[in-house]
Image: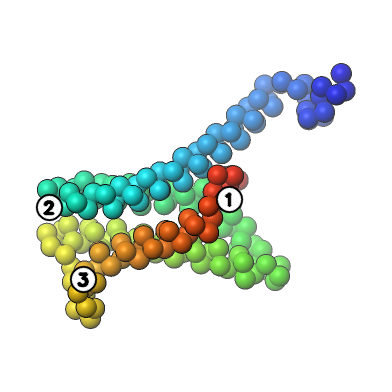
Amino acid sequence: MEAENQGAAPGRAAGSPGERRARSRTAWRLRSRWLVHLGLLVFAAAALGTLQLLHIRNAIHADVGLTFAGLVVVHLAQRRHRIAGMFTQLRGIRRRVVRELRLLASDAILAFVTVNVVVSGILDWNRGAPLLLPVLPLPFDRWHLLSSVVLVVYLVIHVSRRWRRLRRSTIR
């Protein structure tokens, strides 16, 4: 009897409804985190894939891009405890400051670049033509194109550094 209940919490049976609810909540968090990561990868690829359709329908690319931006917001919301924890750790603990600042800066850069892509895309769509940056040489003189390239490069680096931890990450 003792061997059967080793993993159970004290005072609870091994298959109690409370324990099953906690397990299902944890499983849902793991699954939803993985689905958000998968969605981010799919919609980033879809935003690039719909570039071929721009001469036909700009709205498809805009819809995919806005969905990607929404998933970035969900991704950052899922990390809210991590981000809040980083702020509290910065006040007291000095030894992990460099790592935590790097993670915080990475999330801030990701959010900034994503907002930049969305804003430039909306402005291009509203004008009906690309908004040009006269300071830069061709083909990097188009704001939405340049910010999208920066986002793609940053995403490749961001995902490649976290690839092993991506599947196991959890929402707290």
Q: Mark 2 to mark 3: distance in Å?
A: 18 Å
* x, y percent for residue 170: 59, 44
Residue at the extreme right: 2
Q: Which badge, 2 or 3, is on the more N-terminal residue?
A: 2
What is the quadrant of the C terminus in the image?
top right
Residue 132, disc? none
| Pointer 2 residue | 55
Q: Which badge, 3 or 1, is on the more N-terminal residue?
A: 3
Q: Residues within 10 Å of mark 3 (few under 14, many from 20)?
A: few
Left or right of 12, for residue 148: left
Residue drawn at the location 51% of the way across and 67% of the way down: 105
* x, y percent for residue 90: 64, 67
Can residue 110 be seen in the rendering of this structure?
A: no
Secondary structure beneath dot 1 equals helix
Residue 139, disc? 3
Residue drawn at the location 56% of the way across and 39% of the way down: 30
* Dots 2, 3 in contact, CB < 8 A: no
Secondary structure beneath dot 3 equals loop
Left or right of 60, for residue 128: left
* Dots 3, 1 in contact, CB < 8 A: no
The image quarter in which residue 29 lies = top right
| Pointer 1 residue | 165
Residue 104 versus residue 67 in the image, above or below: below
Q: Amino acid at mark 1?
A: Arg
Can residue 146 be seen in the rendering of this structure?
A: yes
* x, y percent for residue 77: 49, 50
Residue drawn at the location 61% of the way across and 61% of the way down: 86
The image quarter in which residue 147 lies = bottom left
Q: Amino acid at mark 3?
A: Pro
